[in-house]
Image: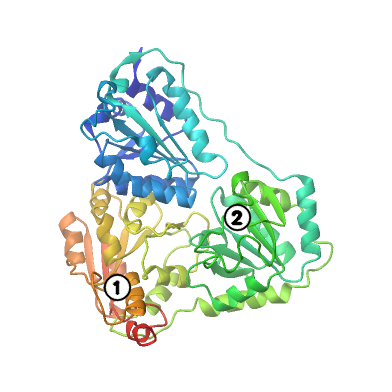
Amino acid sequence: MKTGGQLIVEALEANGTDRIFCVPGESYLAVLDALHDSSIRTIVCRQEGGAAMMADCQGRLTGKPGICFVTRGPGATNASAGIHIAMQDSVPLILFIGQVASHAKEREAFQEVDYKRFFGDIAKWVVEIDDASRIPEFVTRAFAVATSGRPGPVVISLPEDMLTGQVEAPEALPHTPVETRPGEAELDALEMLLAGAKRPFVILGGTRWDDQAVAQMRTIAEAWSLPVGCSFRRQMLFDHLHPNYAGDVGIGINPKLAAQIKAADVVLLIGGRMGEMPSSDYTLLKSPYPDQALVHVHADAGELGRVYRPTLAINASPSAFVTAFAKRRPAATPSWAQETEKAHAAYLEWSTPPQTGPGAVQMGPIMEYLNKTLPEDAILTNGAGNYATWVHRFYRTRRFGTQAAPTSGSMGYGTPAAVAAKSLYPDRTVVAFAGDGCFLMNGQEFATAVQYDLPIIVVVVNNGIYGTIRMHQEREYPNRVVATDLKNPDFAALARAYGGHGETVEKTEDFAPAFERARASGKPAIVEIRLDPEAITPTRTLTQIRDKS
């Protein structure tokens, strides 16, 4: 006889869980009690949104579901931000929520929420476990659902009395991973399309990649001389200094790259959905009928033909597809090799940061310094805001597993993601980028980094405004500023108050020594860059945007 709490922990152990992220609550004390005797590491966070984002980061970097526990009502609603990210980004995650006791349900009891209704549209599956003897079944199924097809978040509601009652239950067994593979006929059809192509282009995206798959994709690109682009915030899928890399297909795309994709006669889209952001509002590939012959490879059959009608649909995971197609070789030397070289040259030009701009701090030289200084396996995280343009456009990613950033455009992600990344890979450098507005949405998770001695470095780009919103505001409603100015704390002093290391950068030349002091401190650190608000993009000022509105 075991309690529901014990059965939950045993099912997690059986499925290979090594850590959970949580904010404790009385609604699932029985689970916390069972964790006391478990080898699973419990990381307590400061807000449920941050905890869910940490779980998302673990799922994003490992391909295995990140696990998060929160309490009912406010705890669950706070966590919903992370669930939305995991859903839009196709990241495996399992959220466990303590629920009111069974006798109190449907009475609007204290903190009661109907989670099937609340999470129904932003989670892949939502279930409430009423019978503790079925815990092994439901938890193992949750792992299968979260990782199969298009990965995503699963939400499991746990009534309090179900967790405390003792029952007999079968021993939990691990889930069986499901792989979808391409057929030979489909590979033949793709080979024929490429044989007849004159201007092909490859776009990599989505999840269910790993180091081996990325290496196989490189082999394919080299054999076929293919130009390769990475979808929005999926830059870690291809080495940026490889001669076949053409750039990132996302917000603020290189105009030369956009023109190349529009002019392509065959587009091979592997793993991604090509949503609104990477498709430039469905203009690079027109929906529902692209101008290009589209070969769409995706692990979930439901995504094939959902937005675009593909010329060839291949229901396969990215890893299985590239493993199979890497065995194929072109019958003749591809005619487009020179165009691939030009595309890489255009990327190198586009990703060379400017050295000047308004104010005393120039982000261009700072990005140049980070490119030269950070090791290839450094992990960079960020949330959302104009500051992220500097990272996505100018930081040249070299390896898989080095980027954690929400394609959903959620602010507040960078700091909690950095905490999770450092807990997973303590020997690697982890740098979070955040705007001033972005940081203060989940910046309290810096305290979590201090608590667990996780020396992340958070670069806070402080321009005193909600920059992206101000940019749009000045363009659409010039000289009518409202709700976008911010009065911020001294972020370096805040870091020290938490028990970390703090630095303030007010001149470009101050950044390198400040960053090195932060790294040498051995503590979680914040390096605040005080950026002129006029430096709203790498190439345009707020005044220029306002004057051209």
Q: Amino acid at mark 1?
A: Pro
How many residues crowd mark 1 within 10 Å: few (<14), some (14–19), many (20+)?
A: few
Q: Label 1, on which residue? A: 513
Cα–Cα span, label 2 and label 1: 35 Å
**Considering the numbered disc 1 on the image, is that residue within a helix, a strand or a loop?**
helix
Res 53 seen here: no
Q: Are marks 2 and 1 in contact (CB under 8 Å)?
A: no
Res 533 seen here: yes
Of badges 2 and 1, nearer the viewer stands: 2
Residue at position x 27%, y 71% from top? 514
Q: Label 2, on which residue? A: 214
Q: Is residue 409 left or right of residue 434?
A: right
Q: Give the quadrant of residue 380.
A: bottom left
Residue 323 image position (x, y, % from top left): 68, 49
Q: Amino acid at mark 2?
A: Val
Query: If you read the primary sequence from the N terminus, does the residue marked by circle 2 or circle 1 appear first?
Result: 2
Q: Is residue 74 above or below residue 13?
A: below
Which quadrant of the figure contains the C terminus? Answer: bottom left
Residue at position x 78%, y 72% from top? 335
Residue 342 image position (x, y, % from top left): 65, 78
Residue 498 image position (x, y, % from top left): 18, 55
Residue 546 image position (x, y, % from top left): 34, 84
Residue at position x 37%, y 57% from top? 410
Q: Is residue 511 above or below residue 113?
A: below
Judge by depth and name the residue closer to the eye, 466 or 147: 466
Which quadrant of the figure contains the N terminus? Answer: top left
